[in-house]
Each structure stands twice: as structure tokens, then as C-alpha cells.
Image (spheres, rainbow, N blue to C red):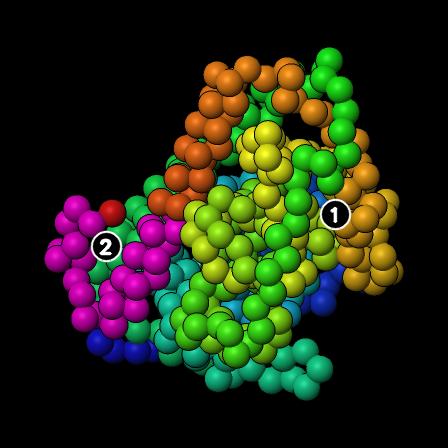
Amino acid sequence: MREVPLETVLELLIDHRGKTPKKLGGDFTEAGVPAISAIHVKNGRINWNERYRYVSEEMFERWMPEKTKRGDVLLTSEAPLGEVAQVPGDDPLVLSQRLFGLRGKEGVLDSTYLRYFLQSEIGQKRLLANESGSTVSGIRQALLRQVLVPLPPFAAQQGVAATLGAFDDLIQTNRDLAADLEHLLFAIVDRCAVDAPRTPFGDLAWRAVERSSVNEMSAGETYLGLEHFGVDGEGLIGRGTVDGINSPSLRFKSGDILYGKLRPYFRKVARPGFSGVCSAEAWVLRAKEGHAQAVVHAVVNSPQFSVVAMAGNSGTKMPRADWDHIAKFEVPDLRDVLSDEDVAALDTLWAAACDLRADNEALTRQRDELLPLLMSGRVRVSELEGVA
């Protein structure tokens, strides 16, 4: 398969690294055109929960003489280098700091194919091979333009993009359905909590603190760092292995709720359907006898929980929630409010949501294993009918 420098197959490259509204004679606003930066691009998607920033229409016109459109590829240039996503629509969007915007030439380079190439192992290696910098490493535009891209015929690129996109579409459908089930669970708990007595959170749930030192971990064992936790209660969004982990961790089991105590305003939560080890910056939470794990799940995902966690935090630049403080937080005691049938219904909703997220784990692994095979040409799209 022939390979060509990226710059020869691009229609557009937007590079606004370091550009700010102050340099353009203005400032961010409370509403208007959304501004996206590297902080929003994670795990192949745009996550707006990290931070909301806007600019005025006038600022947008000054900032973005070249507009984005649906399908354009977003690539983080540093901190970290190599995160990729695509612009979801044609609505006005400002590309802010540490971010490239890329668009393939019509009929030459399919932008979705480019997105998956940049996410692939070979694409990531080629980006990292061109990084520079001492304090913060990244890639300069000149070197990004020279990155070699494997270029099969355009129709073959579209086939690769469609196949991998089918996985991502199903993953997104599962994610949306899981979120709907969880929102229904939260609504039921909120309704039942109106007249319920209160109890300290520490009476509802306990922390599992089984530590695992580096020499107790098994090679390839599942590891969840805070980067694998969803933001704003979204759930599990990825996982890794203990290979290269050199810090103590906590053991968790299937069904546990993991809450990131570092910077609790992000509300980082994971609900693994498997066992493994996780960052010691997380709480491993389990319902106490007589309480439902689904209720613990609903409480931890409530905005009030994060507010209380922040109110009792320790630290300034990197605040951490304090267990002694959060354990005193008064939460609904639903033991006398919920019937056995109610508890069973909540557990069913929660289990169904967890199953969907577990399905997504399997789909993600399949997609990630397939990606380098398709990119290298070792597997052809015609051989994969019915896989996704």
C-alpha cells in the first residue's frame, strides 16, 4: 500500500494553538458559539462536561475565517498529543488551544478513515515519533504535515471507515440506552426519597480498601485509572492493564462503584462489570447489608454528592474528597420506603445498564483489534460481513 505525506491529501488544516480571545481583542462569554480545546477531546469523542466556554458571533468570525464542518477530524497537538475525534455537525464551532482541525481532500482522503488511522497503533507511533518539547511535548504543524498516511483507493477507505464506524454507532446506541436506564433509576430514587428518613452516607455504603502492591499484580491484569472513568456520572469509558503501573492500587470486584476522589467536581464514576485493580485515588464503594447497590449508585451520581465532596475537600490545586466528611452526608434511607419489588426493579435497571456498558467493552476491544488489521490491509472489509 502506498503511503503519502499528510499535507498532500488535506483540503484544510486549521491550527489555532495558543490563540485566545484576548489576543483577538475580546474574551469568552457566557453564551454564544462554543469553543472546543484539547481538554474536550478524549477517547475518540468530544466530552463537553469538562468545561463550557463560548465566544460572541463577532469573535467567532474573527477567530474562524475557515469554518469546520461535519466529519472534520480534531487532533490534540499536546497535553496529551494524539487524542482524536470528529466534528459532529455543521453548527458554528471555535477551535481553541492545543487542537488541529483536519479535512481530507474530496475523493482522495476520507476524513473518517483519517480519524481511524490517527487512532491506530501505527498512526499514534508516527505522531509520537515527531513530538518535541521538554516541559510539554507535542507536535508542530510542519512535522504533522509530513506524517505518512497509508492510502488505499478512496472506496476502500470508505469501507474501512464504515466498518469501524458501525462499531462506534452501536457503542453510542448502547451508551445512550444505558444513560436512559440510569436516568430512570435516578428518577425513581428521587421520587421515593421525598418522604424518606435520612441516614449518613457512611451507613449506606462502605469503602473496600484491599490494597494491591505492585508485586502482587498479575501481568495483563485489568487496571482502571481515573482516565478510564466517565465524567459527570457517565460511567466506565475505557480500561488498561497493570503493565507499567508502579504505584499501589485498590482491588475491586464486579458490581462495585468506583468514585474518583481527586477533583470531585468532575464527578468521575466507573461501574465495572469485571474484577481488577484501580487507582488509589478512587473510592471502591459497596452497599451495606440491607441497602441496595442501585441506591448507592444513584446517590453517588447526584450533583449534591459532588457538591458535598467539594465542600469537604483537602488540597488547593488538586482537591481530594475526604471520606470522613462525605460519610456524614445525609442521604435518603429507602429501606422502609422501597418494597422488595421496588428494589428488584431498581436492581434490574442498574444491571441492564451495566450489561450494556459491558457489551460496549467487548465491542471496543473488537474494534481496537480490528483497526490495525484494516489499516495494514491484512484484513479486507469484504471479509468482515456481519462482524459488527
Foreground of the two, 337 or 272: 337
**In this view, 211 is above or below 290:** below
Q: Which of marks 1 and 2 is nearer the N terminus?
A: 2
Image coordinates of residue 68 in percent, x first then y, are 54, 51
Please state the extent of the stretch shown in magenta in the rendering.
Answer: 360-387
Whether 367 is drawn above or below 379: the answer is above
Left/right of residue 334 with respect to residue 343 in the rendered view: right
Q: Nearer the viewer, mark 1 or mark 2?
A: 1
Residue 265 numbered tag: 1
- Please name whichever residue, 323 or 291, is drawn nearer the observer in this view of the structure: 291
Along the viewing direction, whichever of 142 and 85 lies nearer the viewer: 85
Q: Quadrant of the N terminus?
A: bottom left
Q: What residue type is labelled 2?
A: Gly
* Quarter location, residue 164: bottom left
Residue 379 among magenta residues:
yes
**Amino acid of disc 1:** Tyr
Total marks placed = 2
Q: What element carries label 2?
A: helix
Q: Is residue 266 visible?
A: yes
Q: Which mark is residue 159?
A: 2
Q: Position of residue 144 (x, y in %)?
A: 50, 76
Horizontal side, residue 94 vs residue 240: left or right = right
Q: Which of 222 and 159 is in front in this view?
A: 222
Instruction: Specify few, some or many for label 2: CA neighbours under 10 Å numbering under 14, 14-19, or 20 or more.
Output: some
Image point (62%, 74%), residue name: 247
Query: Alpha-carbon neighbours of circle 1 within 10 Å: few (<14), some, or many (≥20)?
Result: many
How far apart are the two marked residues, 1 and 2, measured between alpha carbons?
41 Å
Q: How far from the left and from the top, in percent, is residue 131?
A: 56, 82
Q: Is mark 1 on a helix, strand or loop?
A: helix
Q: Is the magenta stretch mostly helix, strand or loop?
A: helix
x and y, in percent, of residue 136 in the image: 68, 78
Circle on res. 123: none
